[in-house]
Image: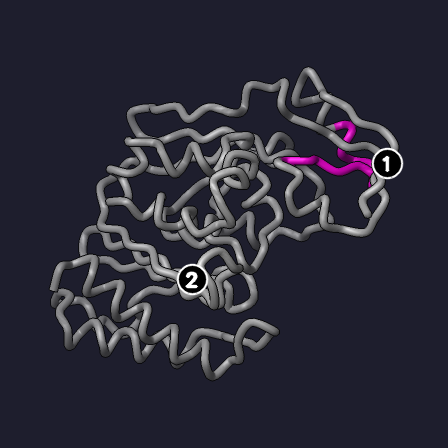
Amino acid sequence: MLTIREYVRPQTLEEAYTLCQKKSSVVLGGMLWLRMQNSQVGTAIDLCELGLNHIEETPDDYVIGAMVSLRQLEQHPGLAALTQGAMAEAVKHIVGVQFRNLATVGGSLYGRFGFSDVLTLFLALDARVELYHAGMMSLADFIGMPRQQRDILVRVYLPRAPRRVVYLSQRNSATDFPTLTCAIARQNGQTCCVIGARPMRAMAFDDEKGLLAAGVNETSAAAFAKDLAARVPLGSNLRAGEEYRRLVCEALVRRGLVQMEGC
């Protein structure tokens, strides 16, 4: 059972940041994972008054507020075009529409959960995050930050540069947490492959051996998938074992490359 002593809606980011410095304070986000905890919260901070629930376009980026829902990501035509449908694919398996109407981008990324589909895809898209105190940084750098460092995730920036993108996941059942996630982005001949739900948080890998340098076809896709599956750190949990995840990883990477290039 989650017990909240005080509920606050800050009117400014400065107020929200000041409040969250207390160890007993928690930023709610969509409050979907938090409510499953058995803990006590001193101050629950709701960012709903700060206007962070919009997706904006600049010449270079899609700017996504921290309070944007996963359903907004799923239905946004610009993000669908940018990712060739991978954005909707990444979130459509997350429980159900009612859940995705409440779950937020900020909550999905700030928690840096190993099972996060959103984290996997955004890492492949070279996302940057804007933190109130720490400022702008790459999502990759943010993932490596200590959890003890308390800040407010304000916005996420997705570059609008054209690239080929695909997203795949393996689940034991349709709306369960994933046993493995895979996002692949290819731009100017360079390939970034992100593997998540390892079951640890997502990690990005490139084509170290140049196996895709001459292009993607059935043979090169299979070679790259085998190489990546051999070097990605994987583990076991209740949903799947390490050996199974390694087999799934090779299959998803190969399938994703073939699908992306239409081989």
Task: Give the crowd class for mark 1: few <14, some 14-19, many >=20 residues within 10 Å.
Answer: some
Q: Is-magenta flag for residue 19? A: yes
Q: Which residue corresponds to the image point at 52% horizontal and 38% vertical from the top-left?
A: 98
Q: Nearer the viewer, residue 172 or 47?
A: 172
Q: x, y percentage for residue 176?
A: 52, 59
Q: Of the two numbered discs 1 and 2 on the same chain, state the one appearing first in sequence.
A: 1
Q: What x and y, as percent, mark residue 199?
A: 55, 68
Name above or below for residue 54 compared with residue 170: above
The segment highlighted magenta reads: 18-29
Q: Is residue 32 left or right of residue 109?
A: right
> From mark 1 to mark 2, how far is it between C-alphas?
35 Å
Q: Which residue is mark 1?
A: 42
Look at the numbered disc 1 and give the secondary structure of its residue: strand
User: Residue 70 or 61: which is nearer the viewer?
Assistant: 70
Local SS, label 2? strand
Q: Which mark is residue 143?
A: none
Q: Position of residue 66 (x, y in %)?
A: 54, 32
Q: Is residue 65 above or below residue 138?
A: above
x 29%, y 31%: residue: 77
Give me the residue at 77% from left, 24% from top: 8
